[in-house]
């Protein structure tokens, strides 16, 4: 039997997720949206590409949570995206209300699902989702680090004129202006990037510019699109997490996971490298951070904590 993947939110990211799941033949798809017509219309459109793309999965649209019953994976993009000039944090109040509805909709219908949240502001929304739903912390996780890391790696590949496949790196912390690109954990063809700086292949100044472009990578796209935010790369990132869970790949991926003691941080969701396998988040990998990285990571965690306190003011039940 095919795995059942529910996508809550059939907007730009939701639609792209559905298309990727179908063409990659990962499982059956239920596209859920309060705007039922969008969910049904996109599902039908994608289904009609099945003879061409050669997939036999079942894909349906709905606005009823009962249709999402016993999902194996749920990916949540329900919410409002940014408009030009907005920060992710500006979305807090409206998306908090939406995520409460979603949590109530999924908690009893799919108690065993692996739940991936993409709705912004990411770290606080995923933390609220876990609290509202009461689902196990290792089964509720946020997508951001894969996207931020992918942007960083892409920009480096363009600068160094080298394939993205030859670059290893990651971005940790909260999904906002305080995210931390791990320069000391960046390898080009297996060589630490610091060695390339020493050899004069890239300057420290240029790396800082690339880090800053990564931090504002989402806003750069929001500005171009004028309406809505990035959706292709965010969808690909969500799929990588879902596949690692469904196929028990045990990939090490930077995700917004529940941290309780690791990295000297307690009781908060933020971006750290984790192993995702059939049990959800199976392990948090603790990288050795240098003094600067520690300081920046702790700043980022504080920014997430501050925003979570703002969320608690909006909804004291959190
Ligand atoms: P969009 O195309 O507007 O789709 C959102 C969908 O959610 C719409 O179709 C709405 O009808 C639907 N929706 C609204 N309220 C509900 C509800 N209560 N229940 C079910 N569905 C509802 O947005 P998008 O797909 O471009 O983006 C979705 C979210 O992802 C936004 O919050 C973005 O900010 C966020 N996002 C996060 C990242 C990360 O890296 C974390 C990247 C890009 C976008």
Image: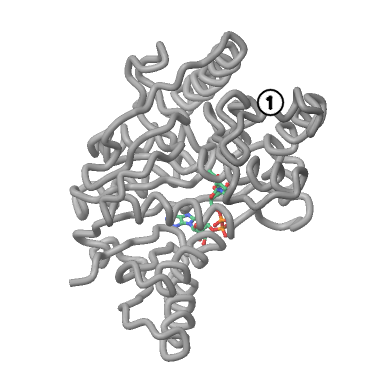
In the picture shown, does residue 165 fall above or below 178?
Answer: below
Between 60 and 33, the one lying in front of the other is 60
Dividing the picture into quarters, in which one does residue 4 lie? bottom left
Quick one: which residue is furthest to the front in this view?
Answer: 199
Q: Position of residue 20 (x, y in %)?
A: 46, 68
Q: Residue at x 52, y 66 (%)?
A: 16
Q: Split into 4 quadrants, where in the image is the C terminus?
A: top left
Quadrant holding the N terminus: bottom left
- Give the image location of residue 294, x and y in percent: 54, 13
The answer to whether mark 1 is within 8 Å of ligand 1 is: no
Which type of secondary structure does the marked residue at label 1 adopt?
Answer: helix
Asked whether, in this view, residue 196 is left or right of residue 62, the answer is right
Q: Residue at point 49% right, 72% down?
A: 38
Residue 310 in the image: state x and y as whole percent.
52, 23
Q: Which residue position holds label 1?
A: 195
* 166 vs 317: above or below: below
């Amino acid at each position: 039997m095919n795995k059942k993947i529910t996508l809550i939110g059939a907007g730009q990211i939701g639609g792209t997720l559905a298309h990727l799941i179908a063409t990659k033949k990962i499982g059956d798809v239920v596209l859920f949206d309060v705007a039922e017509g969008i969910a049904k219309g996109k599902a039908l459109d994608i289904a009609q590409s099945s003879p061409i793309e050669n997939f036999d999965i079942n894909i349906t649209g709905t606005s009823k949570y009962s249709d999402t019953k016993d999902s194996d994976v749920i990916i949540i993009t329900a919410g409002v995206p940014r408009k030009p000039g907005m920060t992710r944090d500006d979305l807090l109040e409206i998306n908090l209300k939406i995520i409460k509805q979603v949590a109530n909709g999924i908690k009893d219908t799919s108690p065993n699902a692996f739940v991936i949240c993409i709705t912004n502001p990411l770290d606080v929304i995923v933390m609220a989702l876990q609290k509202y739903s009461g689902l196990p912390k290792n089964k509720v996780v946020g997508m951001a680090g894969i996207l931020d890391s992918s942007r960083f790696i892409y920009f480096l590949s363009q600068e160094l004129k080298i394939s993205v496949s030859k670059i290893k790196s990651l971005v940790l912390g909260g999904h906002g202006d305080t995210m931390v690109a791990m320069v000391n954990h960046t390898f080009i063809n297996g060589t630490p990037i610091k060695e390339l700086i020493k050899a004069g292949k890239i300057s420290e100044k240029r790396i800082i510019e690339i880090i800053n472009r990564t931090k504002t990578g989402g806003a750069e796209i929001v500005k171009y699109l004028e309406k809505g935010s990035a959706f292709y790369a965010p969808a690909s990132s969500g799929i990588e997490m879902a596949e690692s869970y469904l196929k028990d790949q045990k990939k090490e991926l930077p995700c917004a996971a529940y941290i309780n003691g690791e990295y000297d941080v307690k009781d908060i969701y933020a971006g750290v490298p984790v192993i995702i396998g059939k049990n959800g988040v199976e392990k948090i990998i603790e990288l050795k951070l240098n003094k600067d990285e520690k300081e920046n990571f702790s700043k980022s965690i504080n920014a997430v904590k501050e925003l979570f306190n703002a969320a608690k003011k909006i909804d004291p039940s959190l």
